[in-house]
Image: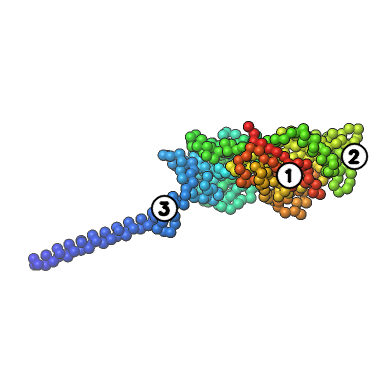
Amino acid sequence: MQRAHDNRKQCIRSAATLLVLLCAVALSFLAALLSASCGLKNGSPSDGRASGAERGLSVRIAPSDVATSDVATSDVATASGTGPGVLLYNASPSRMSSKAVTVSASLSAESETGIVTVSLDIANKSRSSVFLDPALCELLASGTFSGLPYEVFRDGKKFTWIDTSIEIKKREQTRIELFYKPVSDPALFERYRLSGDLSRTYAFSVSCVSLPGGKPLFAEQFEFSIPEHGYESWKVAHGLERRLSTFGYAFDRDAFVREQTRYLRDADVALFYDAHGDTFEAEHARGGAEAGAGDGTGAAESGGETEEAFVRIAGDEIYLDQLLIAFAPYRIGDTVFVSVKIVNRMQEELKIDASGITLVAGGATYNTVHDFSGLKSSLTLLNDRFPSGILIAGRNDRARFTLSFPGVPSAARFSLDLSGITTYRNTAVFCRSLDFEINP
């Protein structure tokens, strides 16, 4: 009997030892699984993908859930097209709820383009649909109206929203992305078509989310901001206005007016007559001055006869009788941009061939390549006959565009050869190149 008792004790000890070994193996296997899971999340080299540090991280202003630092790093591209050089703003509050409808909001901005994206995650747990009207999605910058979205995406797909609201059905969740191009410096925008630096603060009203019938669900607004010192650091590194150099005309204006007036007369540029053969002189003498008085493009008249071509320079604007052209150059980095404004009241069409416009600096010549496709649809139908690098401006057409000349060394002066700006019959509009120098 004693021997049987000893055998039972030995069996119990063996079973306990085996159980301990099995537990140890199980724990080791579980630890390996957890380690592999962490490696997948972190993009470790062991799974064939480079880590974030190896790929190179872009510096961003920290989102609201980073309490210990004002700068976070990330290289993750989102559905809104964000990437390196993107500012992420703190949201206050980050979420709102009303009548079983929850809206979470975030705001990001691209340093290079100035595009601001507001992302809304909407969860509708109510018993009826709710609606979002993009036409009411106002963005405020530093307390003033900044604009409406120029583009809207729903769950990654572009939404055509003119006169249409977005319906979020009951028990539905959706993501809305609203794209803005706010103007923080109206004077800079008017002259150079540049929006200015991004604002440190933005606000977004959620009154655009409503019940059936149009009653807003929320009366509050989301506030977005960047810490003051973080914003100043960003401006030093990426701020547009600190990197911007502007240029003005650098030639004798009186001499240019004399030369240009003589040229327009001698070259018989079609300022006073119809390019299709019908005389325009009588009509111009009767009402040309009144027709152009609003913007200074009308010609003088005396005794019922048309006077010599009217040429004048005012600021950036050059008035060539029935044609107004303005040039406003600026530099960012090693690229010179030229903002161009055109108002054509000539009977003959104006032709702009970007390949015929060159910049000369330091003895070197720089070319520009420009695609006018986005402008052609709003101007004369004659544009259908020409490639994308040529723009035709008919009578009473207006156009704004910006030409770029990359790789230009830092120079205080340069000249623009405007041979590519002609009448429809290929007569050059300008008698000479225009000289520019950096503004003090």
Q: Earlier in the sequence, mark 3 or mark 1?
A: 3
**Crowding near pointer 3: few (<14 within 10 Å), some, many (20+)?**
some
Assign a secondary structure to mark 1.
loop
Quote the CA–CA distance across marks 1 and 2: 31 Å
Q: Quadrant of the N terminus?
A: bottom left
Instruction: Describe the element under mark 2 as helix, strand or loop.
Output: helix
**Cβ atoms under marks 3 and 2 closer than 8 Å:** no
Is 208 or 211 nearer to us in this picture? 208
Residue at mark 3: 42
- Residue 427 seen by the camera: yes
Residue under the image location 74 percent in, 33 percent down: 252
Q: Could you tell me the amino acid type at mark 2?
A: Ala
Question: Which quadrant would residue 312 be assigned to in this image?
Answer: top right
Q: Nearer the viewer, mark 3 or mark 1?
A: 1
Q: Give the Cα separation between the discs numbered 3 and 2.
A: 79 Å
Between circles 3 and 2, the one closer to the viewer is: 2
What residue is pinned by disc 1?
418
Badge 3 element: helix
The quadrant of the image that shows the C terminus is top right
Foreground: disc 1 or disc 2: 1
Residue 430 rendering spot, x and y as whole percentages? 77, 42
**x, y (%) of residue 192?**
66, 39
Query: In this figure, which residue is indicated by the disc labeled 2?
Result: 282
Which residue occupies the foreground of this view, 24 or 94?
24
- Quick check: 44 left or right of 265? left
Quadrant of res 250: top right
Q: Amino acid at mark 1?
A: Leu
CA distance separating discs 3 and 1: 55 Å
- Asked whether residue 220 is in view, the answer is no
Q: Which residue: 40% across, 58% down?
A: 46
Is residue 225 shown left or right of residue 186?
left
